[in-house]
């Protein structure tokens, strides 16, 4: 199988509206008084942490299921809710652009943990050459530093709306192997700050990692049934870079042309260009996302004469009764949609 075609990306190495704060269900037994107060920035991360924590503690989640972390605007009550936190887990990579202000306003002294540490990070570029998968993994530290410097220069030269997250793609959860790295970081952090429950965190976490390894293998098997020339994705915003890189897809284009959902609708010229790309590449189906209004993608599908596929779960989990209520369910659902729509 050939390497993924990463149009508009290079590979570098690297270590909604306001909604009420939600928490996962409380344990049925008395919670340990020494258990730390743990906050997650959004629903996918909260799911990872809760799987490691099990019944030991309850995770406070800021951006709930279905919420858009790109446009999140915390209320005063939400700011106050993190004041007494012991740990705040974040994706980092400038995904939670609102978190600095929230932490400063709350006065919290919580330790801030970036779960993306250790992940090989994709860098976003408006345009660029395709990169071989093996070459992507062979960048050394010197090349990484040079690329990072160049990316920052690019960031200064381009429109701000196209780089709301800087030059690095924060959507690491698209590759299940990145989720495993994040879960290992969560296990280590919880075990260090709460050593009395380290054994439980280790047991829960390793069981979850086994499940994630099985998920990764299943995605590779299922996507392998899609002909290579049909592994082409068009979505609302640039959220599938890691999925495409890991599972051999090509990102043909996105409606918003950005890593973020901020910045408003595209211009008529940008829509026309994307419609032409869809036609030229023979893309049979395009997709809307659960964190955005599907009307824009429906209009593009109509103009291009292609189908609008089922709505994908991208930057947030779905509600408890949805097919994307957990990270495993979300990734399984998205993959099934791709296979059924593209194969």
Image (cartoon, rainbow, N blue to C red):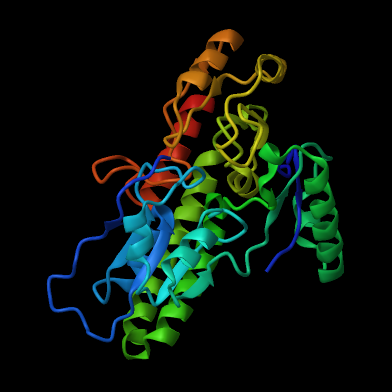
Residue 45: image location, x then y, percent: 43, 59
Residue 312: image location, x then y, percent: 44, 35
Which residue sits furthest bottom? 196
Residue at 63% from the left image edge and 69% from the top image edge: 118
Residue at 55% from the left image edge and 30% from the top image edge: 236
* 32 left or right of 261 in image: left
Residue 269, quarter of picture: top right
Quadrant containing the N terminus is: top right
Residue 163, quarter of picture: top right
Residue at 58% from the left image edge and 35% from the top image edge: 237
Residue at 44% from the left image edge and 67% from the top image edge: 209
Whether residue 186 can be seen here: yes
Total numbered circles = 0
Looking at the image, residue 47 lies above or below residue 228: below
Looking at the image, residue 220 lies above or below residue 100: above
Whether residue 139 can be seen here: no
Residue 338: image location, x then y, percent: 50, 33
Residue 23: image location, x then y, percent: 27, 59
Looking at the image, residue 203 lies above or below residue 118: below
* 235 left or right of 294 in image: right
Q: Nearer the viewer, residue 98 or 69?
A: 98
* 319 left or right of 151 in image: left
């Amino acid at each position: 199988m050939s390497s993924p075609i990463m149009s508009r990306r290079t590979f570098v190495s690297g270590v909604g509206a306001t909604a009420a704060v939600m928490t996962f269900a409380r344990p049925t037994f008395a919670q340990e008084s020494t258990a730390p107060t743990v906050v997650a920035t959004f629903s996918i991360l909260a799911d990872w942490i809760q799987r490691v924590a099990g019944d030991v503690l309850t995770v406070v989640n800021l951006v709930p299921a279905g919420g858009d972390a790109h446009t999140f605007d915390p209320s005063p009550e939400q700011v106050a809710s993190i004041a007494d936190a012991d740990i705040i887990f974040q994706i980092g990579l400038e995904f939670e652009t609102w978190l600095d202000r929230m932490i400063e306003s709350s006065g919290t002294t919580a330790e801030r943990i970036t779960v993306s540490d250790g992940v090989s990070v994709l860098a976003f570029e408006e345009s660029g050459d395709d990169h071989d998968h093996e070459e992507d993994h062979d960048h050394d530290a010197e090349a990484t530093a040079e690329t990072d410097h160049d990316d920052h220069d690019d960031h200064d030269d381009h429109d701000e709306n196209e780089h709301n997250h800087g030059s690095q793609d924060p959507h690491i959860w698209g590759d299940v192997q990145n989720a495993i790295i994040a879960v290992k970081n969560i296990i280590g952090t919880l075990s260090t700050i709460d050593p009395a429950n380290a054994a439980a965190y280790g047991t829960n976490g390793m069981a979850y990692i086994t499940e994630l390894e099985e998920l990764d293998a299943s995605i590779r098997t299922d996507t392998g049934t899609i002909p290579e020339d049909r592994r082409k994705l068009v979505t609302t915003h640039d959220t599938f870079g890691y999925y495409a890189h890991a599972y051999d897809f090509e990102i043909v284009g996105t409606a918003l042309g950005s890593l973020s959902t901020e910045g408003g609708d595209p211009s008529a010229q940008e829509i026309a260009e994307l419609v032409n790309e869809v036609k030229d590449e023979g893309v049979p189906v395009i997709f809307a996302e659960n964190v955005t209004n599907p009307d824009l993608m429906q209009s593009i599908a109509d103009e291009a004469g292609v189908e609008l596929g089922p709505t994908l779960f991208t930057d947030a989990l779905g509600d408890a009764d949805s097919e994307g209520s957990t990270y495993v369910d979300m990734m399984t659902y998205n993959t099934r949609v791709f296979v059924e729509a593209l194969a």
